[in-house]
Amino acid sequence: MIRVENLTKYYGDVCAIKDVNFTVHDGEILGFLGPNGAGKTTTLRIITTYLTPTAGTVYIDDLNIAEHSNELRSRIGYLPELNPMYAEMPVIDLLVFVASARGITGRRFKEALGRVMESCGIREVLHRLVGELSKGYRQRVGLAMAMIHDPEILIMDEPSAGLDPNQIVEIRALIKELGKEKTVIMSSHILQEVQAVADRMVILNKGQVVADGTTTDLMAGFEGKAQLTLEVKKATKKSIQGLATKFTDIQIQVDNIKNGAGILELEYPTGQDLREQIFGYAVESGWVVLEMSRRQARLEDIFRSLTVEEGGAHA
Ligand SMILES: Nc1ncnc2c1ncn2[C@@H]1O[C@H](COP(=O)(O)OP(=O)(O)O)[C@@H](O)[C@H]1O
Ligand SMILES: [Mg+2]
């Protein structure tokens, strides 16, 4: 289990993250979601021990990473956001190099190579130059480098950035597959990306955690509004007013009715379904309902409302 406790990081006067808390359970794929500049990379670099926090601690299985960085580095694989790779090197040489830096040589390297060739799907490009690979394959090679020492934890910073739609589908499938065996943290600034692969998500905004939970948890906790649009004929002013009087939870957002005909937009709290009552009222009042459509709050609305620019600096 990874426990992130009260992490704070200042770059000079700039507060990148403040009091960040979350946990990742063994075998879980955690989506770390937030707009650009939210502090994702900063947090991930601290967890991987490449950056020291200003305050706060990360524990991996109750080991403080500051005190056990050498041991813990061998248990973590990290795919950085901008993965620098030597373009003129063949893939195989790059893997030999990364492995030997971790003391993996000889027979152990052969075993490790066999493992990452399979799990990352790079067998066919082993002898190609890194610079000649597609972005999708380069990302797979990056993953192979991150996994050469068979870490139990895999941390990926925006792994699908810059990939085309087909490559994105492939890398998602690969991450899901790897997630069956490993504890994974994957960051992204795109909700759909996280939704597609993660069991749970932590949403970061301006350096602070603003939400933590499964899609269902987040939807349930969201105090949103359901919207109902009606296109009607024969609706009198009096009967429209009567609707809001009869159902106190309903607000009329838009009343575009002229000579009894037009559009009504109603809003009421999510968690209730008032369609039947509203339809019943319309029939009773003699309206002709040409169309009725509902728009539920979606996870996208939640993400947008949690990460909306407020214009204020965070400190
Ligand atoms: N080396 C740095 N020096 C100064 N400010 C930085 C540095 N790295 C990141 N920042 C700032 O910290 C904040 C968080 O950045 P980052 O962790 O890269 O966010 P994300 O990965 O979510 O885009 C941003 O405001 C960014 O400008
Ligand atoms: Mg980043």
Image (spheres, helix red, strand yellow):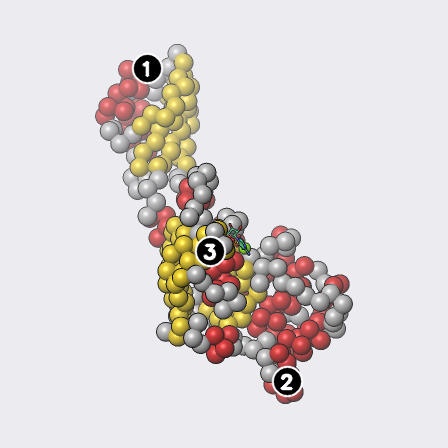
As shown in the figure, which amino acid type bears the numbered disc 3? Tyr
Coordinates of residue 284 in the picture (x, y in percent): 27, 22
User: Which residue corresponds to the image point at 24% horizontal and 29% vertical from the top-left?
Assistant: 248
Identify the mark at residue 236; answer none if there is no mark: 1
Where residue 86 sits, quadrant-wise, is bottom right
Residue hosting label 2 = 105
State which quarter of the image contains the N terminus.
Answer: bottom left
The disc, 2 or 3, on the residue closer to the chain's N-terminal end is: 3
Looking at this view, name the residue that lies furthest to the front: 12
Identify the mark at residue 56; answer none if there is no mark: none
75 or 135, which is in the foreground? 75
As shown in the figure, which amino acid type bears the numbered disc 2? Thr
- Looking at the image, in which quadrant does ligand 2 appear? bottom right
User: Which residue corresponds to the image point at 38% horizontal and 33% vertical from the top-left?
Assistant: 227
Coordinates of residue 234 in the picture (x, y in percent): 36, 16
Res 46 seen here: yes
Coordinates of residue 77 in the picture (x, y in percent): 54, 71
Residue hosting label 3 = 10
Q: For the residue carrying disc 2, how many other residues have a C-alpha within 10 Å: few (<14), some (14-19), or many (20+)?
A: some
Q: How many marks?
A: 3
User: Which residue corresponds to the image point at 45% horizontal and 58% vertical from the top-left?
Assistant: 9
Left or right of 54? Residue 103 is right
Label 1 vs label 3, nearer the camera: 3
Coordinates of residue 170 in the picture (x, y in percent): 60, 60
